[in-house]
Image (cartoon, rainbow, N blue to C red):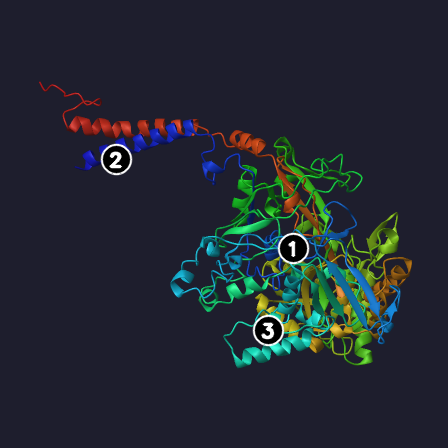
Amino acid sequence: MVFKSFSVCCRRFCLFLGAALLLTACGSEWNDPYPASERGANRLYSAFAERPKHLDPAVAYSNSEIGFIAQIYEPPLQYHYLKRPFELISSTLAAMPQVSLYDQAGRLLPESAPAEQVARSVYRLKLKPDVRYQPHPAFSLNDDGSARYMNLDASLARSLQTSIGPLALADPGSRLLTAHDYVYQIKRLAHPTVQSPIYGMMSEHIIGLKSLAGQIKSTLEAQPTAWVDLDKLPLPGAVAIDDHTLEITLQDKYPQFIYWLAMNFFAPVPREVDQFYGQPALRNGNVNIDTWPVGTGPYMMVYNNPNARIELKRNPNFHDERYPCQGQPDDGTMGLLASCDARLPLIDTLVFSREKESLPYWNKFLQGYYDESGISSDSFDQAVRININGDVNVSPAMSAQGIGLQTSVRTSVYYMGFNMLDPVVGGRTPEEQRRAKLLRQALSIVFDREEFISIFLNGRGHPAMGPLPPGIFGYQSGEAGINPVVYTWKDGEPHRRNLDEAKALLAKAGWPDGRDAKTGRPLVLNLDTTSGGLGDKSTMDWMSRQLNQVGVQLVVRSTDFNRFQEKLRKGSAQMYFLGWNADYPDPENFFFLFYGPEGKVAHGGENTANYSNPEFDRLFRVMKNQPNGPARQAVIDQMLKLVREDAPWIYWFYPKSYVLRQSWLQNYKLNNVASNTIKYQRIDADSRAKLRAEWNHPLRWPFMLMLGGLVLLLWPALKAYRSRSGLDAFGQQVRKR
C-alpha cells in the first residue's frame, strides 16, 4: 500500500507540474496581481503603507490622509501645478478672492495699512456657476422633494457596512455647489465632536467662531445624541450673500489666511451629507464622512477597504478644468506641456493597494505593477547612481527600463529641539540661561549633519541652516544663508566649526570636558524620541558617539507617539526630535514655531521648545503682516539671527524627495505643497501593458528542470515498486522462469 500510494502521489505531482508548465506557456503575465480585465485600462496603480484614520476634510492632517481626500475635495483655491515659486490660483472660484480692510469705525483702509489699524478683514469669494457634487445618496430625492435615504432602518444601514458603503444605495443624486456649503464647513470647524485641529487657530481670526463652539456645545449637552443643524446657528464671520457669493470676516489683518483657503479644512461639506451621515444607524456602523467622503473634486471614492485596497473613480460631474499651458522655462522640453488645455482628470481610475512592507512594493514596482515609487534605504544603491560631481541619476538597470527619477528639496525641516523650560538646556535664572545658551551652541557644532545625511539618508537631504527650507521666502543660499554659529564660509562653501570650538563653548558654559566645573559630575542629556525612523538604535548609537567626542553622555528615552506627545505637552522632555512640513509656502508657517504665545506648555501651541524672546515676538508680529519684498527680508534676517544665536533647535536637515516613475506615467512633476496633483497626470496604458508583458515573461526552463529532476529522483523508487509487483519499470508483466 505504501508503494502504491507513493506511485499515485508521484503521478499526480507530475501532472500538476505539467499543467503549471502548460499554463505558463499560455499566459505572459502569470504574476499579475490585478484582474486580466484591467489590462490596458486607463488606471493608475499606487500603494499606501498606513491606513488613513480620517477622511473628513475638517480633521484630516497627515500625508496618509490628505493624499486621498485632495483628489475628492476642492477648497476655494489651489496651487498652479507647474509654476515655481508656488502660485495660488482658483479652484472653485470664478476669480481670486477680493480682500477689504476696515478700521474700528468701519472705514475702508488701503492694503498696506499696518496691522494695528485693522479691525476687520473681509474676504469675498465668488463661485463658479457650474461646480457639481459627485453622485451620492445624500442628494437623492423623492418625487415630493424630500430626502430619499433619511431615517434608514437598522437592517438597511447594516447592508452599507461594506467596501462599497453608501454607494450600494440606488439612484444617487447630485446638486450644484453653493456658498452655503462653504459656510457649513467653516461652522463644522467649531463642532466639538469633529475636533478639527485648526479650530484653535481659526477661532482667533474668524469672527464668532469661538462663540459658535459654545452654542454647539450647549445644544449637545441638552441633546447628546442629536444631530446639530448648523444652518440654524449664526456665524457672523462666514456668511453666504447669495448662492454663489461668500464672505469670510476676520477680526484682524492676517495675510496668510489666503493660503488656508487652499487647504482641505475649507473644502465644502453640504448640509445634506452631514445630515445623512448623522443618522444613528449609520454613525453607529462607522459609515460616515470619515470613511466615505463626498466632494466636488475630480475623483470619488468607490471602494474602501483600508486594510487592502482603496479605489477612486473619475467623478462624472466634475466641472470643466483644463491642464495648464504655461509653467517653468524647461517644462516644455520635459514634455510637461504636451497636455495643454486637455480636460481634467486625465486618468479614469486610481487604485491604491496597501503594502505594509517596502520590499513587496519595490519588487512590484520593478515588475511594472506600480506606476511610481519612493526609494527605501535598502533599495537606494540598486536605484540610484551619484557621480563625482554629485549629480544624481538612476542606475543603468533602471535607465534600461525607462524609469525616470525626480528629486526635490522638500519644504520641510527636521530638528532636534531643546525644552527651554529645562534648567540644564534652557535655564531658569539669567545665569542658567547664559550657560544653557552656550551649551546649546556647542551641541549644535558637535553633531556632524553631513555625516548623518550620508549614512542614514543616502545623501537625501541638505544640512539645515535655520528653520526656513529652500522654496520659502526668506531662505538664502550661499554665504548669506549659513548659520554662523555652526559654520564658516571658506573656498565658496560652508565648513562646520571644529570640535575645539565646541569644547571651548562647553567650558564657558561650565562643562569643561563634559563635566560640571564645580562638582565634577558628568553632563548627562536625555533625548526623547519615538521608535523607528530617527529614533532607531543605529541612529541613537551614532548620536551617542558624537557627544562622546566632547565628553557628554546621552540617554535615549524611546516611547510611543502618544506618550511622546504627552511629554511635550507637560514640558517633561529635555531634548527631542521633530520635523515640520509647510502647511503653506510662507515664512510665518515656520517662524510661528518660535512665537512665545504658541508655547506648548503655557498655551498648548506648536512652539514645542517653549522658546520665548520678546524681541523675536515683536519682529514676528511685524513680519507676518508684511508682503514679500526687501523690507520683509530684512526683518526675517533679524529673526534668523536671533534663533540661530539662541539655538532653541539644532537645525538638522532639509529632506530631499526621490521619486521613481515608470516611462508610461506622464505629466509628472513633484510638488511639495499641493496634494491634488493626480488629476494632471496621464497614463500610456498601451505602453504599460506591452512593457509589463516583456518584464514578466515566464521562464519555463525552471519548471522543465524541476520536472526532469523529479523523474530522475523518482525513477529508482518506481522501478523498485514495479519489481516487487512483478512489473518492469514501464509497467509490463515480467515473465517468471
Q: Report the quarter where the C terminus lies.
A: top left
Q: Quadrant of residue 646?
A: bottom right
In the image shown, does 571 or 176 lie closer to the viewer?
176
In the image shown, does 189 or 310 lie closer to the viewer?
189
**Is the residue 202 above or below the residue 349 in the image?**
below
Does residue 594 appear in this view? yes
Q: Which residue is mark 3?
A: 192
Q: Report the quarter where the N terminus lies.
A: top left
Image depth: mark 3 or mark 2 in front: 3
Q: Earlier in the sequence, mark 2 or mark 1?
A: 2
Assess disc 2: are there few (<14), some (14-19) or many (≥20) residues with their C-alpha within 10 Å of its C-alpha: few
Q: Position of residue 585 (x, y in %)?
A: 76, 56
Q: Quadrant of residue 557?
A: bottom right
Report whether 401 appears left or right of 163: right
In the image, which disc is placed on residue 673?
none
Q: Which residue is mark 2?
A: 9
Q: Secondary structure at mark 1?
A: loop
Spatial CA span between label 2 and label 1: 62 Å
Spatial CA span between label 3 and label 1: 24 Å
Report whether 736 appears left or right of 710: left
Image depth: mark 2 or mark 1 in front: 1
Spatial CA span between label 3 and label 2: 67 Å
Residue at image position (53%, 71%) is: 227
Looking at the picture, which amino acid does disc 1 mark? Glu
Looking at the picture, which amino acid does disc 2 mark? Cys
**Is the residue 358 above or below the residue 423 in the image?**
above
In the image, which disc is placed on residue 74?
1
